[in-house]
Amino acid sequence: MKKIFELTYEFLMLLSKLTGFSYKEINIIVWFILIPLSWTFLIDKIKGKHYFKVGFSGVIILLLIGIKDFSEFSNQLFDISADFLRGFNLVGMDYTAASVVICLLVPLVVYGVLIRKAYFLKS
């Protein structure tokens, strides 16, 4: 788990350097915007509609317009997310393990289900 966490951290730091966003901003962009947005594209593919991606994009645009300081917003949301992950200590999972399970494995399972339904299961 530690190696996967470290590789993810290094990748996010690279994205941070390439884009000029902070590490915490990149985290928020990836896990709260890009990943859910990609899921809406897959859900729309499954449904044969454009409602989810359009709706989610609209909500994100309105939220981004309403956020006065994206950096401060990202710092606060990142800290709340980190506290959530640290809460898994109660069930014997440290921050690193919880990060890998919740932030990597769960999204990969969701991708697996959505990609299978979108491209391999024809009804």
Image: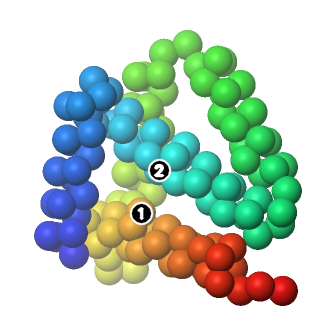
What residue sits right under mark 1 in the picture? 103
Q: State the image coordinates of residue 53 (x, y, percent, origin top left).
A: 73, 47
Of residue 25 and residue 55, the one placed in the foreground of this image is 55
* Amino acid, disc 2: Trp
> Marks 2/1: CA distance?
8 Å
* SS state under label 1: helix
Quarter placement of the C terminus: bottom right
What residue sits right under mark 2 in the picture? 31
What is the number of the mark on residue 63? none
* Amino acid, disc 1: Cys
* SS state under label 2: helix
Q: Is residue 94 visible?
A: no
Q: Is residue 73 visible?
A: yes
Proximity of marks 2 and 1: CB atoms separated by less than 8 Å: yes
Q: State the image coordinates of residue 33 (x, y, percent, origin top left).
A: 55, 43
Q: Is residue 71 above or below residue 47?
A: above
Q: Is residue 56 above or below residue 105?
A: above
Say whether residue 7 is left or right of residue 21.
left
**What residue appears at the point 16 percent right and 60 percent down from the top-left corner?**
6
Of residue 108 and residue 117, the one placed in the foreground of this image is 117
Q: Is residue 33 above or below residue 116?
A: above
Say whether residue 103 is left or right of residue 47.
left
